[in-house]
Amino acid sequence: MNKNKIALALTLTFSILLITGCSTQATPTNQVQTTPTAQPQVQGPGKVLVKTTPIPNVKPPAPPPKIPGITSTEVAKHNSASDCWMIVNGKVYNVTSYVTNHPGGKAIVLGCGKDATSLFESKHPQKAHNILQNYYLDILK
């Protein structure tokens, strides 16, 4: 009986060393690593159960924040009555849905796809500035 206990203790010790300390390969970062969390439990002669708990992978750093703004190159792509963006005082507006309602008729299309600040300022009262705010997209980058 004493020999069985010694053999079991040696088997248990060898198993623990084998499971916890003999790995020489690095664990890939996309796999879950495990570590022992409790004392090994003997499940019968020569059988050992080691409980493990997953260690979550470390997430990569977040991408840098998006710099706000729209470039003039992007604005230039929207240069028609059916797709009309314009720049007024350093801000970009999508006035496409307003083109058909513009009191000045098709004159609004002259500002599509470009900086229309001087055109807008020379023709419009403060009320027009208030209307324009409804079509704001972003600042000019």
Image: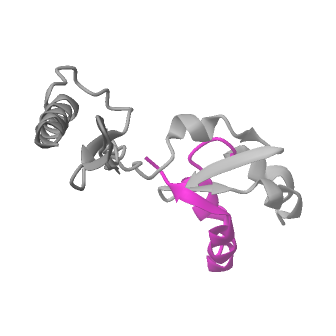
**Residue 63 image position (x, y, % from top left):** 37, 43
- Residue in view at x 15 percent, y 31 percent: 14
Residue at 13% x, 40% y: name it. 9
Identify the residue at the far front of this view: 1
In the image, is residue 135 part of the stretch drawn in magenta?
A: yes
Which image quadrant for residue 46?
Answer: top left
Residue 24 in the figure: left or right of residue 42: left
96 relative to 17 in the view: left or right:
right
Q: Position of residue 20 (x, y in %)?
A: 18, 35
Height in image: 131 above or below 31?
below
**Is residue 55 placed above or below 25 in the rendered structure?**
below
Query: On the rendered structure, is 134 left or right of 42?
Result: right
In which quadrant is the N terminus drawn? top left
Between 90 and 105, the one nearer to me in the picture: 90
Q: Position of residue 64 (x, y in %)?
A: 34, 45
The percent coordinates of residue 140 (x first, y second) are 47, 50
**Residue 25 quadrant:** top left
Q: Nearer the viewer, residue 95 or 102?
A: 95
- Magenta range: 112-141
**Residue at figure coordinates x 53%, y 57% from the top left:** 138
